[in-house]
Amino acid sequence: MEYAACQVSIAPVRALPSDKSEMVTQLLFGETIEVMERKDNWVHIVCAWDGYMGWVDGKQLKRITPSEFDAYTDDQTLNLSLVEGLMASDHFIPLTLGAVLPRYDGLRCQLGEQSYQFSGTVITPKKARLSTDWIVKIAKRYLHAPYLWGGRSPFGIDCSGLTQMVYKIAGIRLLRDASQQVTQGRPVDFLEQCEPGDLAFFDSGKGQIAHVGIILPDCHIIHASGKVRIDKLDHFGIFNKEQSRYTHQLRVVKRLLVDPAPADTNDLSENLSELTQTQTALFE
C-alpha cells in the first residue's frame, strides 16, 4: 500500500481525475491518505480521517512511509488559528484552521524530509478533554465563512464539512457527508433534552438527510447555508429571520459527546491545562 500527505494549504478532492470535475471534499495540509491507483498526474485516494474517496492532483501530495502514515494519522497536532504561516527555509505555506502539523515538537513540524517552523496556536485533541462549551467556541470561529460545496476551511465550507472539522478539532471522528454523519452518535428524543454541541439533521423533503448543524445554547443553531450563520431552531426546523421563513425541516438530533454537560469556567480551564492562556483567549 502507498501512502501520502497533503503538502499544500488546501487540496481539492474531485469526483473524477480532471480539474473540471466536481469537488467532493478537500484535504488540508498534513492530512493523510491511502493511494488506490494512479492515472496520469492524478491519484485516486482514500482519506485516512473519514474513508472518503476521490481524485487529487498528485503534485499536491507528498509520499510518506507506512510508519509516517501511522504516526501522522494517530497522534495529530492541529492549527488552532484561522490562518497562520508555516515557514520553511525557502518558502511559506498559509495554514488554515484544522490543518495538521506532523511530528510537531512545540516549534517545528516535519513532513517527509522537509522541516517547517510554526509559531501559531495549536491543539493536540488526543491530550485535551474538551467540553460542549469548547465545541461551541470552535464552531463560532467559522462564522461568516462562505458556503462552498465540498469545502472544509474558513475560506469555504459546506454544512457537513463544518461539523466534521469542529469535531475533528475536538478529537472526534465524523464521517464526511450529512447522510453519513446521521448514522453516528446517540439519538436525542426531544428537542428540550438537547445540549450545546449536539448535531441536528434536516430532511430534504424527500426523506433524505440533506443538512446538518451544531446546536447552540438558547435554541439556536450554527450551520453553513450561504455562509456559516446562526439561526433559531425549534421543533419544525431552522427559522431564518432575514427571510421570515423556515429553511430546513428538522428530522433528528444526535449526541456524540460522552458528557454533554457544559463546563463552567473553572472546569474549562482545568480541561485545557495543556493549552496556553493565549490559546484559550482566542475563543473568549
Image (tube, rainbow, N blue to C red):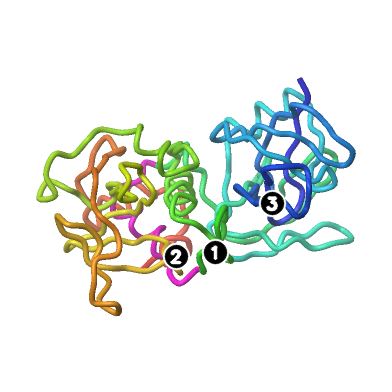
Label 3 crowd bin: few (<14), some (14–19), many (20+), radius 10 Å: many
Q: Is residue 78 left or right of residue 277?
A: right
Q: Which residue is mark 1?
A: 154
| Labels 1 & 2 near each other (Cβ < 8 A) | yes
Residue 98 on image: x %, y % = 56, 52
* Residue type highlighted by circle 2: Arg
Spatial CA distance of label 1 from label 2 is 8 Å
Q: Earlier in the sequence, mark 2 or mark 3?
A: 3
The amino acid type found where label 1 is placed reads: Pro
| Residue 131 falls inside the magenta stretch | yes
Residue 89: give x, y in percent of width and height.
87, 58
The answer to whether residue 178 is magenta is no
On the picture, is 176 further left or further right than 117?
left
Q: Which residue bears the numbered disc 2?
A: 141
Quadrant of the drawing holding the N terminus: top right
Q: Quadrant of the C terminus?
A: bottom left
149 up-or-down from 207: above or below: below
